[in-house]
């Protein structure tokens, strides 16, 4: 059977200029590859099916090309995979376009958002035949075998005779080693590793991919839906299976890998075995991961560095203990300081901190304390994003009880907390404090950690023009009149806090308005690529 799998992305995802194509001719893209559909493709192909993948990050396969291929190749099933609330509107629009082009093809949605909102998605988007919930590997195999009789397929929401049918949930499968490695070679894209900054900060031009070695996180952070999606459980692959995938990636020419695990630093003995296996196998791929600052595996940071762990990212969130407690992080400021210090002392080259601002009950003093705290930490890079709330999180449940959101009208929307919660600081205050805080932070880093800062900038300078590295240094001190550089515009794949703010607004507009915005965005990207080619 022929199956199409499409990875839906927000439209801020840009490929690098054509002049920077990889040696194999592939377009290079900043950001993470679609490991979800790549995993499903490998499962389907092992079972004897034909699978064709599309990624909306590829400028050579826009939606109209995908639809034309559906008309030409006539797949039996088209699966649209997306992770978040912000991607859902684009998935919905594409599904309607596909249905208009082919009335017979079976359409399926999958991903975290679809799982947590399956019945509502099916009602709002009747063009989609199946909303698939939870792990997709065995589910998609069952689905392609029983497209005409899905009654017995656990984890599927569908309709029969105009009535919604919500099949029972699938039992979480703990044997993750049974599945093949993702099908990374069938998608005509190469990805390069970049940092979550608001400038084009490329870490290397090595061939880059992601790997999932575990699933789930049991901690109850109020803004996160991962524990609900994974039923509060954490599941992992065996160390040998992870090392075998590393060996395969090195054979294929990959030079950098990032673990998309929700919390890699959970089981010390497993981490130790993975690091030993990497070294014993002679694997030289550089890799990165993220985890909690209160991990009991910190004594293994030197082993991780020896096994070529280059990047370690922590969810710090705030420099105020009161805010951390409000977010139910179950960590202390001392935990943060210890984890960051231990990582740097162990030789981890890049230690990153994720922060949020605009949380409920946060004061101006809390925000200032957060930036001052971040400045004094030995972090190499950092991101400060506005806290948002979306369905499926404990914070959404709190907002329901407080009457700030309505499940009937708002379930598919994405709100900045400061726009709907009166206990949050006003948006203009948050933005002003964030701008001022960034200036203080950057000034402190340059004066107190000059060598660390220069080492990081030197790495960026390997792949960036000197003028853009200089702009990186002076940007926090410039006024708002200075617009983005051409490279900044081309680096929309990098997490930019202002783009995240804009994404919240896009979930709240009508489909007609969104379609017009998408058309204008597509036209702008075409102009940018043409300007870059001419320049």
Image (cartoon, helix red, strand yellow):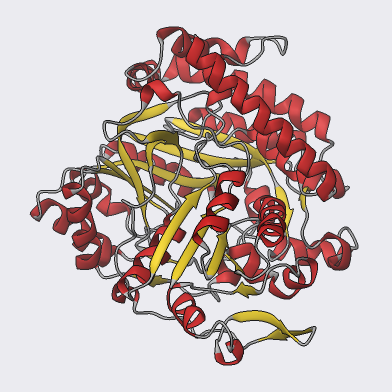
- Spot occupied by residue 396 in the image (x, y as percentages of width and height): 76, 62
Query: Is 519 left or right of 8, judged from the image as shown?
Result: right
Q: Residue at x 77, y 59 (%)?
A: 412
Above or below — where is 142 with respect to 339?
A: below
Above or below — where is 354 with respect to 122?
A: above
Query: Is 472 left or right of 182, judged from the image as shown?
Result: right
- Spot occupied by residue 270 in the image (x, y as percentages of width and height): 26, 66
Q: Residue at x 51, y 65 (%)?
A: 75
Asked if residue 295 shows in the view, the reply is yes
State the residue lying farthest toward the bottom.
152
Q: Residue at x 44, y 68 (%)?
A: 2
- Spot occupied by residue 385 in the image (x, y as percentages of width and height): 64, 38
Q: Nearer the viewer, residue 45 or 157?
A: 45
Q: Residue at x 79, y 67 (%)?
A: 124
Query: Is 368 left or right of 377, judged from the image as shown?
Result: right
Above or below — where is 212 with respect to 252?
A: below
- Spot occupied by residue 243 in the image (x, y as percentages of width and height): 20, 59
Q: Nearer the viewer, residue 219 or 525?
A: 525
């Amino acid at each position: 059977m022929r199956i199409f799998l499409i990875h839906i992305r927000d439209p801020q995802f840009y490929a690098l200029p054509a002049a920077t194509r990889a040696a194999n001719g592939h377009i290079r893209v900043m950001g993470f590859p679609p490991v979800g559909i790549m995993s499903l493709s490998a499962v389907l192909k092992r079972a004897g099916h034909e699978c064709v993948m599309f990624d909306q990050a590829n400028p050579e396969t826009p939606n109209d090309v995908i639809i034309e291929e559906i008309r030409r190749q006539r797949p039996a099933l088209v699966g649209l995979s997306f992770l978040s609330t912000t991607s859902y509107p684009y998935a919905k629009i594409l599904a309607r376009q596909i249905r208009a082009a082919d009335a017979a093809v079976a359409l399926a949605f999958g991903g975290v958002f679809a799982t947590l909102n399956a019945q509502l998605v099916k009602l709002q988007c009747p063009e989609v035949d199946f909303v698939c919930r939870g792990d997709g590997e065995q589910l998609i195999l069952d689905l392609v075998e029983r497209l005409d009789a899905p009654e017995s397929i656990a984890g599927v929401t569908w309709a029969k005779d105009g009535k919604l049918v919500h099949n029972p949930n699938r039992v979480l499968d703990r044997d993750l080693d049974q599945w093949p490695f993702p099908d990374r070679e069938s998608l005509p894209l190469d990805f390069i590793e970049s940092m979550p900054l608001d400038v084009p900060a490329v870490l290397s031009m090595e061939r880059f991919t992601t790997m999932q070695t575990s699933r789930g996180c049991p901690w109850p952070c109020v803004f996160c839906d991962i524990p609900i999606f994974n039923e509060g459980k954490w599941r992992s692959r065996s160390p040998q299976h992870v090392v075998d995938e590393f060996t395969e990636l090195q054979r294929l020419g990959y030079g950098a890998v990032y673990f998309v695990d929700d919390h890699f630093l959970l089981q010390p003995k497993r981490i130790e075995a993975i690091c030993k296996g990497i070294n014993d196998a002679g694997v030289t791929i550089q890799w990165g991961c993220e985890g909690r600052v209160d991990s009991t595996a910190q004594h293994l940071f030197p082993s991780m560095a020896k096994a070529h762990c280059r990047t370690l990212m922590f969810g710090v969130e705030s420099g105020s203990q009161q805010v951390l407690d409000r977010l139910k992080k179950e960590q202390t400021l001392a935990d943060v300081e210890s984890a960051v210090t231990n990582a740097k002392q162990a030789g981890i080259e890049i230690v990153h901190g994720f922060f949020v601002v605009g949380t409920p009950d946060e004061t101006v003093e809390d925000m200032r304390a957060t930036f001052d705290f971040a400045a004094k930490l030995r972090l190499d890079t950092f991101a400060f994003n506005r806290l948002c709330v979306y369905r499926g999180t404990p914070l959404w449940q709190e907002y329901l009880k407080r009457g700030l959101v309505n499940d009937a009208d708002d379930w598919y929307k994405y709100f900045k907390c400061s726009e709907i919660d009166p206990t949050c600081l006003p948006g203009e205050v948050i933005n002003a404090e964030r701008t001022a805080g960034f200036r203080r932070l950057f000034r402190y880093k340059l004066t107190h950690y000059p060598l660390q800062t220069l080492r990081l900038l030197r790495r960026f300078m390997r792949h960036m023009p000197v003028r853009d590295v200089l702009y990186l240094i002076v940007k926090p001190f410039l006024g708002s009149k200075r617009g983005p550089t051409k490279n900044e515009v081309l680096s929309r794949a990098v997490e930019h806090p202002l783009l995240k703010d804009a994404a919240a607004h896009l979930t709240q507009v009508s489909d007609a308005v969104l379609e017009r915005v998408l058309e204008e965005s597509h036209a702008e990207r075409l102009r940018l690529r043409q300007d870059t080619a001419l320049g």
